[in-house]
């Protein structure tokens, strides 16, 4: 268990949801995130800052990625993520980005694989497409056919790109695709997640940007509806720091086994680390 959120925890932790950016654009990227979500960010979005923030809390591995808001960004983003993975052997697993409006998604995925990236991250809300659209399902088919997992942003009461209704269409159309639904399957719309998604589809979810926005009892309900062995822990870096996310996690009434699954074991197994 976590001895104290203010001290180094006694168990290993994997942060399974981290956005990172080159130093030359990190300030602009972080400002864009702050504006999109209406929050104040204190972290700077760089690799060094991520590692520094996590090192005090026994974080031993990070799943890192970024998102292309237009097709022309896909190649350079994937090359950046790959370079950071190579620069930090054993510390990072990198997921690449794809965009459904690309003229050559297959070619983009070939390049992603050549770079050694292990999965794909999409963000329908930021990329401007619905998970229920044909082009999103086509992207999912391409990823599935290559045997890669797909991590997707899910949910936002302000939009209809990735809410449970759209997510359900996507999942029904893509049996066999390994999916991680970010934000416990639907940020801010968890009642609908429970009705449409949780326990009904063979997917994983991550916890980032969730516990601070939910009553602990609701978080516990969602976790157990999916199964505690299907939940990965993350901070949504640079949105939130490890200290505060661990503090929110510590408020949940979880068994020792559930807590260890969420903080470490599930991600270690999913990412092939153990």
Image (spheres, rainbow, N blue to C red):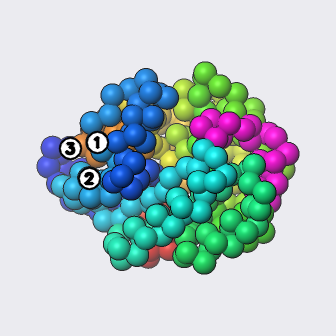
Residue depicted at 50% across the width and 74% down the height: 272
| Residue 163: percent from left, percent from top | 67, 32
Residue depicted at 26% across the width and 53% down the height: 49
For mark 3, give the secondary structure: loop
Disc 2/disc 3 C-alpha distance (Å) = 19 Å
Farthest residue toward the left?
7
Q: Which mark is residue 5?
A: 3
Residue wearing tag 1 = 43
Q: Residues within 10 Å of mark 2 (few under 14, many from 20)?
A: some
Residue depicted at 45% across the width and 35% down the height: 33
Q: Nearer the viewer, residue 104 or 91?
A: 104
Q: Earlier in the sequence, mark 1 or mark 2?
A: 1
Q: Residues within 10 Å of mark 1 (few under 14, many from 20)?
A: some
For mark 2, give the secondary structure: helix
Q: Tell me: 262 left or right of 59.
A: right
Q: Earlier in the sequence, mark 3 or mark 1?
A: 3
Figure check: 127 above or below 54: above
| Residue 48: percent from left, percent from top | 26, 58
Q: In front: mark 3 or mark 1?
A: 1
Query: Is 129 in the magenta?
Result: yes
Figure check: 261 above or below 168: below
Residue depicted at 60% across the width and 44% down the height: 69
| Residue 156: percent from left, percent from top | 59, 28
* Contact? badges 3 and 1 (CB < 8 Å): no
Disc 3/disc 1 C-alpha distance (Å) = 18 Å
Residue wearing tag 2 = 49
Magenta residues? Answer: 123-141
């Amino acid at each position: 268990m976590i001895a104290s959120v203010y001290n180094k925890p006694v168990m290993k932790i994997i942060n399974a949801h981290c956005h990172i950016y080159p130093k030359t654009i990190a300030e602009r990227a972080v400002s864009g995130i702050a504006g999109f979500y209406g929050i104040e960010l204190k972290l700077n979005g760089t690799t060094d800052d991520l590692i520094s923030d996590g090192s005090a809390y026994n974080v031993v591995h990070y799943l890192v990625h970024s998102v292309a808001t237009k097709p022309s960004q896909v190649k350079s983003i994937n090359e950046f993520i790959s370079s950071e993975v190579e620069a930090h052997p054993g510390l990072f697993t990198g997921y690449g980005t794809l965009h459904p409006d690309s003229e050559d998604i297959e070619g983009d995925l070939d390049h992603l694989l050549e770079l050694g990236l292990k999965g794909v991250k999409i963000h329908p809300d930021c990329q401007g497409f619905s998970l229920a659209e044909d082009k999103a399902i086509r992207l999912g088919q391409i990823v599935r056919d290559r045997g890669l997992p797909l991590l997707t942003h899910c949910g936002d009461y302000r939009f209809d790109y990735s809410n449970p209704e759209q997510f359900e269409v996507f999942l029904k159309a893509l049996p066999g695709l390994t999916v991680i639904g970010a934000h416990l399957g639907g940020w801010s719309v968890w009642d609908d997640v429970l009705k449409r998604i949780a326990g009904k589809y063979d997917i994983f979810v991550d916890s980032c940007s969730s516990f601070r926005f939910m009553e602990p009892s609701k978080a516990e309900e969602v976790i157990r509806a999916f199964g505690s062995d299907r939940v990965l822990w993350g901070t949504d870096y640079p949105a939130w720091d490890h200290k505060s996310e661990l503090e929110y996690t510590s408020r949940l009434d979880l068994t020792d086994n559930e807590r260890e699954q969420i903080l470490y074991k599930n991600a270690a197994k999913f990412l092939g680390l153990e």
